[in-house]
Image: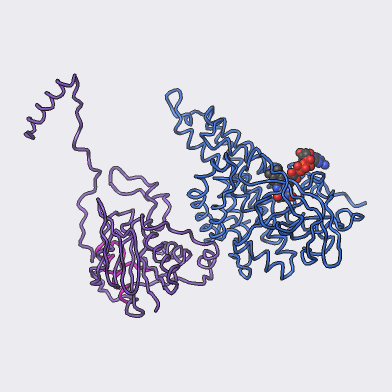
Amino acid sequence: MDLSLTEQEKMVQSVVREFAEKEVGPIAAEIDKTERFPTETLKKMQKLGLYGLPYPKEYGGAGGSDLSYYLAIEELSKKCATTSVILAAPASLCAWPIMKYGNEDQKEKYFRAIVEGKRVGGFALTEPGAGTDSAMQQTTATLEGDHYVINGSKCFITGAGQFEFFVVMAMTDKTQRTRGISAFIVEANTPGFSVGKIEDKLGIRASATGELIFEDMKVPKECLLGKEGEGFKIAMQTLDGGRIGIAAQALGIAEGAMEESVKYIQERVQFGKPIGSFQGIQWYIAEMETKINAARGLMYDVIYKKQKGIPFSKEASMAKLFSSEMAMWVTDKAIQLHGGYGFTKDYPVERMHRDAKITEIYEGTSEVQKMVIASHTIVPKNK
Amino acid sequence: MKLKVLVCIKQVPDTNNVKIDKETGTLIRKGIKSILNPEDKNALEEALRLKDEIGDVFITVLSMGPNQASVVVKEAIAMGADRGILLSDRNFAGSDTWATSAILSSAINKIKEEDGLDLIFCGRQAIDGDTAQVGPQIAQHLKLPVISYVEELKYSENKVLVKRAIEDGHYIVECPTPVLLTAVKQLNTPRYPNMKRIFETFGENPERPIETWTAEDISLAKENMGLNGSPTRVKKIFTPSRKFEGEFLQGNLKEVARQLIVRLKERQII
Ligand SMILES: Cc1cc2nc3c(=O)[nH]c(=O)nc-3n(C[C@H](O)[C@H](O)[C@H](O)COP(=O)(O)OP(=O)(O)OC[C@H]3O[C@@H](n4cnc5c(N)ncnc54)[C@H](O)[C@@H]3O)c2cc1C
């Protein structure tokens, strides 16, 4: 496994790092506090070309590697996890399935729009009764002439009220369970589409998460993504790639907390010395750094497999599981190293800890990742 | 008609994070990241802004430095420049500002003869040497007018209207092109290199490969390059020591005033 970055990847890393330091970090505390969606940052990221980073040039993308995209997520997350969600939800959860399963018209209309930084879209799978058990879809889509009529509701959808279109999963055949689920591309201004409750959250507060409600919403037949019955497969494959993004996000959050901690312990003086000179403090730093590096290793491993075309479901789950739990642990210790100051909003580590928590939940909880890993590991013996 | 712009850029150590060796007085470059000199970025941004505004603008970037300096030339192309040239040769090593400006000028002359040039931009100064000499010296070599410390620029039909910063105010200068301008950071906010252009510019098969020119490619005698061509002799580098030490006068107002008069008289100020 070759983990060295190419000249291009190094450049992407250094440009996004500078971008995050200058444009993202300075407003992170404010947008967290006020739950303000940073439209200006979205526009800057679109101009920078981040939304098309790993996608083909023929659709306006940069033609970059998967690794370069995950490096960008990591760098943004060091300063502000919300901002990395605003990149990842459209670039990964919405653009990817359209690229993979969309027909030429859909790719031109929706995929290109995201890739070229003109529009942003989201991904709507979760429902009140279909969380971890995402196959329990209650939303239905019924073909009537040249239209599908969609009824139901989605919850916890990133970009609700902010993004312009969504890849929506709905049941087209209730008798079939997972094979009865289909995927649709739905414009948010379609009559019958409305946004319900927006959640008041612990972390990633500037990215709105909320309900989508569909009432006799008529969408043209052409909105079907892939074939009827392929929706569940599309969703699961999308989440495989998305999980690497969450691993990168968690890694970035932890690295950000680490940077803050290393700085703080060298400045804060107690007993006449910087607290960083005490071995008890250094041991925390050593453990934090080791866990961060282990997470980076798992992330690089899965990206390597993805780029080589080797199946990577299990590795994506391992990277996400480990990285997100690591981020919770590291940000907790970062607060500890800051003492009482770390518990206040004068320092960013408490925000990082709150932001880290979501990485253990969305795109499959830690428990789900364990199910995936176990199912790949416990292979039944042939009779 | 196409506006032809040349921007001189330099790779420098990121001195924001650099330390100075107390004994030798020089920068400790070890482990320090190399970057595109900040005010050169402002110079390039201004050229790019003109391109956004006018459209028909061709931007060449020129840098002298070792092979590693190709990174900043590529970065400039990724930001939007059309052509990149790196001047790299052993014979250039050890050049002071005079030799550097002579080498750059002779390359600029070559470009000018081939294709014409309307505007030449430099950054005000490089953060590693802080001399602010190379820009004006190039203008001298090329016998062009120079406007330094540019903080605002308007271009229209073969002339520029410039707001030029001075310590306690500014000049408004109008000048026909061709002209050399040196940019200060107040001029603009440089853009970031776009992701797509990064992938087009860096890596193995770049769409806009940079050109490397050696001493053979320019018409400048060898004795005018490198150490031989450098009249500057560094006598000593030192950290200036603080000469004046303050003294606190203590007591009530009258006493302090009396002491002050004594001190001023001692120094024959009054
Ligand atoms: C901020 C945020 C943004 C989100 N963005 C999106 C989005 O853009 N699109 C989208 O479709 N969804 C999104 N989600 C939804 C998210 O993916 C779900 O919340 C998640 O999948 C868990 O579902 P649930 O909340 O219903 O929890 P539940 O499924 O009710 O789980 C509750 C607990 O039980 C555990 N559990 C459940 N079943 C089992 C089992 N069989 N064995 C062991 N443990 C189990 C879970 O791991 C969890 O710990 C988002 C959620 C949040 C909070």
Q: Main secondary structure of the magenta part?
A: helix
A250 sits left or right of B162 in the view? right
Q: Residue B89 colored magenta? A: yes
Residue placed most toward the observer, B65 or B131: B131
Residue A46, horizontal then vertical, whole percent: 57, 59
Is residue A144 visible in this depiction of the protein?
Answer: yes
Q: Is residue B138 above or below residue A75?
A: below
Q: Which residue is pictured at 34% across the width and 53% down the height? A: B127
Q: Is residue B205 above or below residue A295?
A: below
In the image as oriented, which residue stretches furthest toward the front?
Answer: A191
> In this picture, which residue range is highlighted in magenta?
B86-110
Residue A131, horizontal then vertical, whole percent: 79, 45
Q: Which residue is pictured at 77% across the width and 47% down the height? A: A373
Count of picture labels: 0
Residue placed most toward the observer, B236 or A194: A194
B66 sits left or right of A136 in the view? left
Hue used for the chain lettered B: purple
Quarter of the image containing the N terminus of chain A? bottom right
Residue A246, horizontal then vertical, whole percent: 66, 48
Residue B211, horizontal then vertical, whole percent: 42, 72
Report the chain shown in blue. Answer: A
Q: Is residue A210 above or below residue A7?
A: above
Q: Which residue is pictured at 41% across the width and 64% down the height? A: B67
State the scheme by which the image is colored.
Answer: by chain
Figure quadrant of residue B215: bottom left
Is residue A362 visible in this depiction of the protein?
Answer: no
Quadrant containing ligand 1 reads top right
Figure quadrant of residue A253: top right
Q: Residue B232 colored magenta? A: no
